[in-house]
């Protein structure tokens, strides 16, 4: 394990964190999406109404659809908000966005990112670089710190588009770090709390469940590393169960008492929405839809439309099959915290590929944990580069206003140039990270972007087919993400087989 | 990591900071009837596009010089014309004669900001990168750090991308001039500097060091042989470049005279507004404008300016070296800033850019100066609504300089290039031994004071009897700092006995 650096070492981490926070401050006057109004509305709801009304209030179309802990978080924020601008807390002030409101909300995101900074710091301590370079810029710790703190996706989704993913990912990375440190109960507690902040993290819950079961509840292993069934500890599983129940009770308890659980559940899991979002997240369904539409255009028969899919096949099936398959894999092999992390990433990616009404922002759920693995092995670094570049590119349609076009391109270039050159420098002796096909695929993103943002708006097709740039971006990125997912899957499987063979 | 990727990242960071600052407000936003510098630049596009060249600098029915008349040399006018052609393609309303006065819209703002970015990318940024890449006797790490610090220098970003101006063009040309001279390409250097002067006449602040350095070089080569040839070649280059820039105006003497009248408004008085120079600061105690006549004021400022810059210039002519040239650029420009006529607060940029060039040699003093120069612009920035950008960019600059150059460790006399001076002084003042500690504490006190004044200016309202309390305090504090720096930089030039060749390897 790489030891934490000394006095001057702490300096660079602080400088990186401060630098990115200052950049976030500069992004305060940029475009913000409807998510800004969503959170302003939730501030108003939680500030003015009693708890019993929180999940029933529907003056605004942006009703509360996050779990109760997030609602309490907004409640706490609203007490600071009143010192900035009282008007933002009035429920009827729909789309209220005075300068003070924007300033307060943006500042709250920047401030809560402290948790993410702390989590990144904890993760950096457990990075296992094979050859720590003498040069600071080539230390795996430094590279990981930049890849996490200056992550492009997180910057534009949180600080331009406007969301609170920073501290949520902070909770997740912190729980991962605690599991690395063998502080299993803390890790479990943090993840349970996280689930009650934003339920999207349920996608990676199977990884946690299986890992905790395997590595914490079974206290010993056999000599060859496989499971020792007799070492099952009832005390430990009870403790874990207690933690989960306690957290759930704290969160959902008040609503269960009020008999509002069905309402809360219906708000959290709105299955009435379609299979795909208005903008297709670059996942399997995007590819499916594209093929379907092409077939519809080419032929007259339209067998497979998404209404059919929606009613006959629960879309979660494929993703859960995936999750269970590799967690099943994990049960039989003792791979440790790193294996857990790989499992987590695969769960996140599978659910992104096959999930219901997936947002393109969900790709961050896979990208951020993968950063931890990318600085440790060249194979992972190659997969990380493909996933992260296509994943970040797929976020481009979120920012469509003219001033933000230059911002997103510059930020994307910054992150991409850094990630490529730093990982290449880190693994200089291992040869190329990407083969020629992968490189060409990634380079082709540049002409795609030029076409979508510059050429297409000047053509006459803009009025007739305004969705073409979105379609192209989504489908092209879906190819890259699918490829990265498959490559990671295969690489994890082959590594597991090798480990098993070695053990035998 | 490879140098090119680090440099790319540095440039991208510089561009990102520039572009995000440009989201903020600009000078005169939403303030009819006169608006501000942004409207002035738009108006020049309107004038240069719609009127014939003969009328650009004259007061006619179509061109009211009272409303932001052109007062920069011809290259600015040509640049505005070029931008106007592009504007015409996008939206002719932006430059329609008379009707486009006070035009403000989001697309127009985006267009104007884009023109600044493009000009910056074409002229200033390449000059900075090339300068840093070819610094002699410095490690790659220091080169990249210098480039990053120079590109993140707050004042230039805030004035060009916030307030709205095109200083990066003239400063970029001047920087190209310095770059060419450092490679002994004297003709190209002279050409670049002439372009700089012909873009903004304030670049004349730098003209004496250029002149003295080149003259000194000619003397060194021997005035009877190669030196004379070089002198003639340089003279020819200068005259030719001026002729080409002023060609459309050379048809009549009256045209040239009118342009000169617009460039040098001598009848405007010793100073306007609050600026961190001697005259404005002295006027707190004595109302100079009331005591002396305009002619006497002119003569006094002339005398003081040349008195303070002559020693450095003479030494430069007698012993020309690149190092002395760069320090002379600073001290001459600073003398002009402090003592000259009709100085604007933005002219501090002319001092700051040469200081930026020495950031890897004396990081602490340069960082200190650059912070003060940004602080001196505070009243202007507050008026433009750029407080957030100011605070963020200043903090970022301080962080980057402090971490890249470890400025708090390098405070000995040798690091501050004052070895020879301190050796002479130590005999007289024994307490000079505590020099590093004194400098460090002074720096911290100064930065704290600037922080407190910033906070006060931003949050408190001044008492009714002294409505200009905060701008004047900022100006006086900055002026005192500048006097200290003037002494410091002059001391280096005058006491420096090295000629640049036997410097230690700076790492």
Image (cartoon, rainbow, N blue to C red):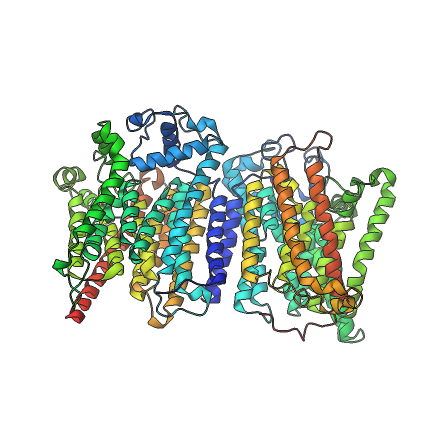
Quarter of the image where the N terminus of chain A is located = bottom left
Choose top left, top right, bottom left or bottom right for residue B38: top right
**Residue A375 point in image, percent of width and height:** 35, 62
**Residue B327 point in image, percent of width and height:** 71, 62
What is the residue that sits farthest to the front in this orientation? A235
B458 or B163: nearer the viewer: B458
In the image, residue B29 sits, relative to residue B164, either above or below, namely above
Residue A274 appears in view:
yes
On screen, residue A289 versus residue B319, left or right, reads left
On screen, residue A93 versus residue B201, left or right, reads left
On screen, residue B469 versus residue B42, left or right, reads right
In the image, residue A294 sits, relative to residue B185, either above or below, namely above
**Residue B94 point in image, percent of width and height:** 55, 36
A133 or A420: nearer the viewer: A133
Q: How many marks?
A: 0
Residue B40 appears in view:
no
In the image, residue A145 sits, relative to residue B389, either above or below, namely below
Choose top left, top right, bottom left or bottom right for residue B416: bottom right
**Residue B64 point in image, percent of width and height:** 70, 34
B137 or A180: nearer the viewer: A180
Quarter of the image where the C terminus of chain A is located = bottom left
The residue shown at (57%, 61%) is B406
């Amino acid at each position: 394990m790489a030891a934490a650096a000394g006095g001057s070492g702490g300096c660079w981490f602080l400088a990186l964190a401060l630098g990115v926070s200052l950049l976030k401050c500069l992004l305060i006057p940029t475009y913000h999406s409807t998510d800004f109004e969503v959170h302003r509305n939730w501030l108003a709801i939680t500030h003015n109404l009693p708890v019993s009304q929180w999940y029933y209030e529907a003056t605004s179309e942006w009703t509360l659809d996050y779990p109760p802990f997030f609602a309490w978080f907004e409640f706490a924020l609203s007490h600071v908000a009143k010192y900035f601008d009282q008007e933002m807390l009035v429920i009827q002030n729909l789309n209220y966005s005075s300068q003070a409101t924007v300033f307060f909300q943006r500042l709250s995101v920047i401030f809560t990112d402290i948790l993410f900074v702390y989590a990144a710091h904890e993760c950096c301590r457990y990075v296992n670089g094979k050859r720590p370079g003498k040069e600071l810029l080539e230390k795996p710790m430094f590279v990981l710190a930049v890849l996490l703190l200056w992550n492009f996706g997180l910057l534009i989704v949180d600080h331009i588009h406007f969301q609170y993913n920073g501290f949520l990912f902070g909770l997740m990375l912190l729980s991962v770090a605690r599991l690395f440190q063998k502080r299993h109960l803390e890790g479990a507690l943090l993840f349970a709390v996280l689930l009650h902040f934003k339920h999207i993290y349920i996608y990676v819950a199977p990884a946690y469940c299986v890992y905790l079961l395997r590595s914490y509840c079974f206290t010993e292993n056999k000599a060859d590393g496989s499971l020792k069934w007799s070492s099952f500890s009832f005390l430990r599983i009870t403790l874990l169960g207690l933690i989960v129940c306690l957290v759930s009770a704290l969160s959902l308890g008040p609503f269960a008492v009020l008999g509002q659980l069905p309402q809360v559940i219906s708000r959290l899991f709105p299955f009435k929405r379609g299979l795909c979002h208005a903008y297709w997240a670059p996942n399997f369904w995007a590819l499916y839809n594209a093929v379907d539409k092409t077939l519809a255009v080419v032929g007259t028969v339209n067998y497979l439309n998404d209404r059919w899919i929606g009613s006959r096949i629960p879309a979660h099936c494929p993703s859960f099959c995936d999750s269970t398959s590799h967690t099943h894999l994990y049960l039989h092999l003792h791979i440790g915290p790193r294996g857990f992390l790989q499992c987590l990433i695969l769960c996140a990616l599978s659910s992104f590929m096959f999930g219901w009404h997936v947002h393109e922002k969900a790709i961050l759920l896979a990208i951020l944990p993968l950063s931890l693995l990318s600085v440790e092995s060249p194979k992972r670094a190659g997969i990380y580069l493909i996933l992260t570049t296509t994943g970040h590119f797929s976020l481009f349609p979120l920012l469509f206003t003219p001033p933000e076009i230059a911002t997103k391109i510059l930020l994307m270039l910054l992150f991409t140039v850094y990630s490529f050159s730093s990982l290449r420098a880190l693994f200089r002796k291992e040869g190329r990270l990407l083969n020629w096909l992968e490189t060409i695929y990634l380079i082709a993103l540049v002409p795609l972007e030029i076409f979508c943002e510059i050429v297409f708006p000047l053509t006459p097709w803009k009025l007739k087919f305004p969705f073409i740039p979105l379609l192209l971006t989504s489908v092209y990125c879906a190819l890259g993400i699918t490829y990265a997912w498959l490559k990671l899957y295969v690489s994890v499987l082959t590594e597991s087989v090798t480990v098993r063979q070695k053990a035998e | 990591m490879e140098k090119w990727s680090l440099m790319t990242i540095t440039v991208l960071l510089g561009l990102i900071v520039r572009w995000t600052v440009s989201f903020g407000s600009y000078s005169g936003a939403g303030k009819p009837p006169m608006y501000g510098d942004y409207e002035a630049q738009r108006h020049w596009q309107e004038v240069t596009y719609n009127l014939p060249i003969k009328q650009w600098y004259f007061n006619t029915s179509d061109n009211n010089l009272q409303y932001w008349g052109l007062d920069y040399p011809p290259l600015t006018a040509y640049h505005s014309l070029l931008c106007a052609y592009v504007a015409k393609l996008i939206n002719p309303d932006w430059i329609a004669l008379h009707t486009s006065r006070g035009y403000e819209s989001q697309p127009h703002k985006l267009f104007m900001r884009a023109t600044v970015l493009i000009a910056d990318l074409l002229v200033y940024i390449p000059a900075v990168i090339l300068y840093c890449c070819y610094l002699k006797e410095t490690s790659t790490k220091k080169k990249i750090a210098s480039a990053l610090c120079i590109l993140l220098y707050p004042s230039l970003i805030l004035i060009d991308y916030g307030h709205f101006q095109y200083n990066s063009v003239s400063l970029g040309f001047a920087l190209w001039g310095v770059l060419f001279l450092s490679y002994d390409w004297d003709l190209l250097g002279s050409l670049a500097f002439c372009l700089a002067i012909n873009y903004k006449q304030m670049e004349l602040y730098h003209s004496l060091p250029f002149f003295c350095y080149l003259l000194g070089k000619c003397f060194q080569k021997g005035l009877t042989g190669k030196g004379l040839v070089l002198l003639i070649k340089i003279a020819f280059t200068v005259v030719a470049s001026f002729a080409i820039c002023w060609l459309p105006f050379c048809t009549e003497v009256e045209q040239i005279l009118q342009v000169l009248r617009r460039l040098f408004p001598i009848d405007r008085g010793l100073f306007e507004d609050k600026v961190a120079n001697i005259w404005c600061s002295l006027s707190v105690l004595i109302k100079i404008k009331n005591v002396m006549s305009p002619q006497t004021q002119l003569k006094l400022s002339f005398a003081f300016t040349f008195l303070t810059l002559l020693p450095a210039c003479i030494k430069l002519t007698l012993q020309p070296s690149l190092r002395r040239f760069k320090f002379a650029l600073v001290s001459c420009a600073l003398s002009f800033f402090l003592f000259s006529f009709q100085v604007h607060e933005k002219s501090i940029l002319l001092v700051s850019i040469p200081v930026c060039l020495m950031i890897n040699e004396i990081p602490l003093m340069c960082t200190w100066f650059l912070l003060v120069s940004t602080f001196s612009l505070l009243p202007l920035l507050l008026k433009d609504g750029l407080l957030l950008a100011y605070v963020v960019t200043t903090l970022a600059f301080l962080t980057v300089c402090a971490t890249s150059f470890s400025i708090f460790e390098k405070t000995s006399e040798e690091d501050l290039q004052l070895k020879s001076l301190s050796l002479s002084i130590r005999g007289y003042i024994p307490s000079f031994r505590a020099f590093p500690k004194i400098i460090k504490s002074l720096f911290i006190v100064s930065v704290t004071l600037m922080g407190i004044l910033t906070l006060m200016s931003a949050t408190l309202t001044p008492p009714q009897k002294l409505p200009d309390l905060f701008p004047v305090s900022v100006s006086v504090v900055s002026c005192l700092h500048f006097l200290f720096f003037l002494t410091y930089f002059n001391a280096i030039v005058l006491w420096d006995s090295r000629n640049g060749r036997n410097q230690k390897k700076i790492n």
